[in-house]
Image (cartoon, rainbow, N blue to C red):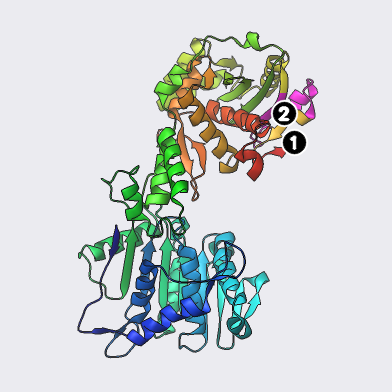
Amino acid sequence: MTQTKSSSSAEFYYDENEAYKVSRFFSQMLTHPKGGSGKPKPFILEPWQDEYVRNLLAWKHKSTGLRKYRTTYCEIPRKNGKTTLAAGILLYMLLVDKENGKEVYSAATTRDQAGLVYEIAAGMVSNNPMLKSRCELIKSKKRIVTADGYFQACSAEAGAVHGSNPHCVVFDELHLQRDREMWEAFHTGFGARSQPVFIAITTAGHDKSSVCWEQHEYSRNIINGNIEDDSFYPLLFGADPEDDWTDEATWEKANPCLDISLNRDYLKAECKQAQEIPGLENSFRRLHLNQWTEQESRLIPMQQWDKCETRAQVEEFDGQVCFGGLDLSSTRDVTAFVLLFPKADGVQVFPWFWIPEDNINKRAAQDQRVIRAFADAGYVEVTEGNEVDVMHVAARITQICSPFDLRRIGFDPWNAAGPTQRMKELGLPEDVLVKMPQGTATYNEPIKQLLSMLGSGRFKHDGNKVLRWMASNAAGMEDSNGNLKFHKGKSGDKIDGMTALGMALALYISENPEGSAYKQSGSGVILF
């Protein structure tokens, strides 16, 4: 549902000439710089965009003739053209608005995101000879300079812009902003301007302690009539909590550009995947329905996990191809090693675990008895001393792998120099060991593949109780693009076996002759 606050007061009037000028600037001066071939297409505003920019810029104070709105918060799902719209508004404020010494900024958390607004704006300028003659494009600085002002892209990575005197700021993807520094620096700079405009335009997030959630709630309270603020213009697109997230009517409600910039078939495919892989539901709802969801969600459907248990023994796979994953964790914690064997109908995995003997009775209360019970039952190998015996672990891994056609072992490079060096000394070829950074670049594709294989029964395990416990602990943490990595979740219980499994699965995917998204987009794997 589109939620806005209408402007109606004896103190304000709607400037029809300004509204017409805004729409005309977009349709006659700006183009869509991306997509298609041949002559660039004019930027004809969609109905919701036209209403939004007209309301934002054409409502004025009767007493002064200055703009009514100083701040606007626009929350809308992905692929509805928000960044392109933001670039167009910035160019209007830079090239048309009457203000001396204009400073116009696009702000974002990362350099890449801030640069995206610049690239779109620069493309629009380049496509129009009249605009190009009035502007100097400085690509290295992400800056557009005119005779009476400039546009500058800036990011939180480069530090907050203190001392600025902004006429207009667009904060793109506000939900990514980690703190208030940049937000407050720009707001402080508005004091010397007669009618500055601060525009926050974003997809929903998951951090309810953030400045983005604060603006979301402020917007919602204005819409609901709980707060009166004539200088603030809220616009929220999204599904309501009770809406069926799989229903196309819900998609239409949340996405004003569905079937325009957002392809319905793409959304159907994303929804189908989220239904088949429960761990992706939050990502779909946040990115495509604009619902604020938890960052973490329990990933593994344990009923499916239990159905994938087999009575296979590792000795049955002598001579066969396999891939390994090693999570050393820390010198005082659980170390996990997993071997993955490709099969005609999927994969089979076997895990091993180690823990220092002196540390079993010193573990945190939440998993102390669990680890001790596993060790007593022989599911966790105990090494002497109060730190993991890296030489013993290295020798055991070398011994475990010797009967098989081992292709690669992925490992977290942090704190793993000793064991990996020892494994090379014991005979493992150097090119077998692969450093794997512990982020979404490594784990996103393996997690999705694992969930898919669990659902179809193509993932098989030997029923190891430690790995099952860690699978039940595993949560998924997503980044801004919906990419996943394993996370302990709020319980804090161990998931070392799952991270080792993820690395082994990542290596398997990277060498899968059928190809994969991993192979096409880069896996984050670094050869040792």
Asked if residue 113 lies in the magenta stretch, the reply is no
The answer for how far apart the CA atoms under marks 2 and 1 are is: 10 Å
Q: Position of residue 328 (x, y in %)?
A: 61, 29
SS at circle 1: loop
Question: Do the numbered discs 2 and 1 sit on residues whose CB atoms are within 8 Å?
Answer: yes
Depicted 212 relative to depicted 133: above or below: above
Q: Which residue lies at the image location 46% right of the left edge and 66% below the top edge?
A: 171
N-term mark: 2 or 1: 2
Residue 382 in picture, x, y percent from top left: 58, 15
Q: Callout 2: 10 Å neighbours few (<14), some, many (20+)?
A: many
Q: Which residues are magenta?
A: 407-430
Q: Position of residue 172 (x, y in %)?
A: 47, 64
Residue 249 falls left or right of residue 30: left
**Which residue appears farthest toward the front when viewing the image?**
38
Task: Residue at 61% x, 17% y: name it.
Answer: 384
| Residue type highlighted by circle 1 | Phe
Q: Residue at x 51, y 67 (%)?
A: 107
Relative side of 5 to 396, left or right: left
Depth check, front residue: 395 or 25? 25
Which of pointers 2 and 1 indicates the residue nearer the eye? 1
Residue that mark 1 sits on: 528
Mark 2 = which residue? 420
Q: Would you say residue 428 sits in the magenta stretch?
A: yes
Task: Residue 80: give x, y in percent of width and height.
Answer: 44, 59
Residue 162 visible, this orientation: no
In the rendered structure, the answer to whether residue 255 lies left or right of residue 504 reads left
Q: Could you tell me if residue 317 is visible in this image? A: yes
Looking at the rendering, in which quadrant would you find the N terminus? bottom left
